[in-house]
Amino acid sequence: MRKLLFQVAFLLFLDCLIGVCAASDVNLKVTYSPEVFMPDDIVTFRVEIQNVGSKKIEPRPTHVFSYSTRSKNVTIARAPEAPPYRGLAPGASITQVRKIKLGCKNLVRIYIQGGVEWSRNVDAKPCADFYASCVERINKLRTLENLPPLGREQGKEGCSDNDARTNYEKGPHTSQCGQAQNECWTANSIDEILNKCIEQHMYYKEKVCYNNNPGGCYHDKACICGHYVNMLDKQEYGYRKAACGLYETPTGKFHSVTNFFK
């Protein structure tokens, strides 16, 4: 991997050296299909590079395609064309097509010299839907106790994803970007997180503990109820928003957190 990254950097350096680094002269368009897919489906990416400048670009721009899934990180560089250069005339474009098998959570990055970049989380349906479904499930449980819904804090879902990964690797609640945090054990599926961890365990089971010992939620190891307290805000901490985070482990399982914000 280190050798490949060095080769990519060297190719980009050569391009800049011969004067192909003007970002304003190059437009990058990326589409993929199907846009809705399941884990381990093949997704087709169409990468179009267009010369929007007034001069011919020689050689044609290099693009670097990289993607990260649960089990691998792959970087592919299209090397500059060999002389004699055909170049890329003003208004002209070239298209590259790549077919890759994606997991549930995926980060795809396409870069062309000059700083033009397309980077996006391209997630399969179960993972793409998780963030909204997680907050909706918590609000469903709050409704049972006549409590208003929490807002979905989308701007904090990135740091919540990071929390989920860090906590999986280093231990529970090692990383927390909210004022309070609930954490689910590593699960086999998204449904297991929502149904077993959040609803059955954190709500119904811990509600019994809370009713039996409302003041000892964080201290009675035999019957904890701190997750229930965070979701329902029984201590009136003033939580008004929630952001869920998800990490797909190298073995294809899922670790999740929910951060709460005032």
Image: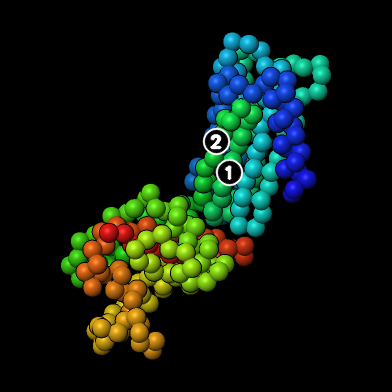
Disc 2 residue type (three-letter) = Trp
Q: Observer-nearest residue: 169 or 247? A: 169
Direction from residue 32 to residue 259 in the image, left or right: left
Identify the mark at residue 146; answer none if there is no mark. none
| Residue 96 location (% of width, % of height) | 66, 31
According to the picture, the residue beneath numbered tag 1 turns out to be 108
| Residue in the picture at 70% in, 31% down | 12
Q: Observer-nearest residue: 205 or 118? A: 118
Disc 1 residue type (three-letter) = Val
Question: Image quadrant of residue 197?
Answer: bottom left
Question: Image quadrant of residue 184?
Answer: bottom left
Secondary structure under the numbered disc 1 in the rendered image:
strand
Q: Are marks 2 and 1 in contact (CB under 8 Å)?
A: yes
**Is 46 situated above or below 251?**
above
* Other residues around mark 1 within 10 Å, as few (<14) / some (14–19) / many (≥20): some
According to the picture, the residue beneath numbered tag 2 turns out to be 118
| Residue 199 location (% of width, % of height) | 35, 72
| Residue in the picture at 72% in, 37% down | 8
Gap in angstroms between the C-alphas marked 2 and 1: 8 Å
Number of marks in picture: 2
| Residue 173 location (% of width, % of height) | 45, 69
**Which numbered disc flags the more N-terminal residue, 2 or 1?**
1
**Is 93 situated above or below 67?**
above
| Residue in the picture at 26% in, 62% down | 239
| Residue in the picture at 35% in, 66% down | 180
